[in-house]
Structure formats: structure tokens, C-alpha cells
Image (spheres, grey):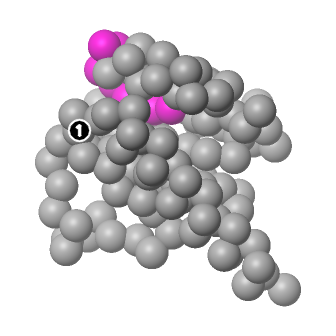
Amino acid sequence: MQSVLLVDDDSAVLDTLSMMLRKIGYAVYQAAGPDEAERIFRLHKSEISIAIIDRVISGGDGFLMACEYLGESPNLAVVVISAFFDPSGTLFHSRFELLEKPVTVIALKTAIENALAKANVNRLRAP
């Protein structure tokens, strides 16, 4: 079973997405903010294969958090979620999958599959 680090400062969204992820077969580490996410990532980095991070989060920037985690775990699959997206703006990163809120189970599953595919391509390119 793959593990997901799920980061969102809205407890209702966090609980709903966590339930969806468990329903489709993922183990979930929940974090309500950047500090908690950092602690969980440090403790479980070797287990976490997917990070799903809210773009706009109290006390931090989800996009920058995702970049930091990707720098430490180059094969990490990353999904950035937000209700406020401009895919042509600074959010874009070729390794990130972007997912707009509100999230459906189908959209979540598709975004994870796409992020995992991007991570696998990266693995194949690594020396």
C-alpha cells in the first residue's frame, strides 16, 4: 500500500480527502499545516510516495513546500490542490499534477495516477 502525505489547513477538506484516499487504497498521513507536514515528512520520508498539498495554506506556501519535498525525494509524486488556480502562472512545475477544488474521487484518483506517471518518468531518466 502506498502512503500519501496530505496537507490542508481546512479540517473538513483534510478529513474528506483523507477518507477518499483511504477508500481508493492509500495509507494517509494528515497534516494541518507546514510545521506538522515537515515533521511527518521527516519521520516517514522513506514511506511516502505521494504528496498532496494545498496551494494556499496558513503559515506557508504549498507550492514551495512541494518543491522542497521534491528536492529531497526526487521520485516523489506531487499533486498540488487549490480552489484558486491559474495553470499558466507561477504554479506550473512539470513534475506537479494540478487539481482544482472541489475534488471528486475520480479526479483525485486521476491526478494521483498522472503524478505517479510523472514520477516514474523521472526515475527512468535518473542516472
Q: Is residue 2 magenta?
A: no
Q: Position of residue 110 (x, y in %)?
A: 45, 50
Q: Position of residue 120 (x, y in %)?
A: 69, 68
Residue 89 horizontal side relative to residue 42, left or right: left
Number of marks: 1
Residue 12 horizontal side relative to residue 97, left or right: left
Figure quadrant of residue 27: top right
Vertical comparison of 116 with 40: above or below? below
Q: Residue at x 45, y 32 (%)?
A: 7
Highlighted range, magenta: 6-12
User: Is residue 104 visible from the viewing direction of this image?
Assistant: yes
Under circle 1, the secondary element is: loop
Q: Position of residue 56 (x, y in %)?
A: 26, 41
Label 1 belongs to which residue?
Answer: 101
Q: Nearer the viewer, residue 74 or 59?
A: 74
Figure quadrant of residue 32: top left
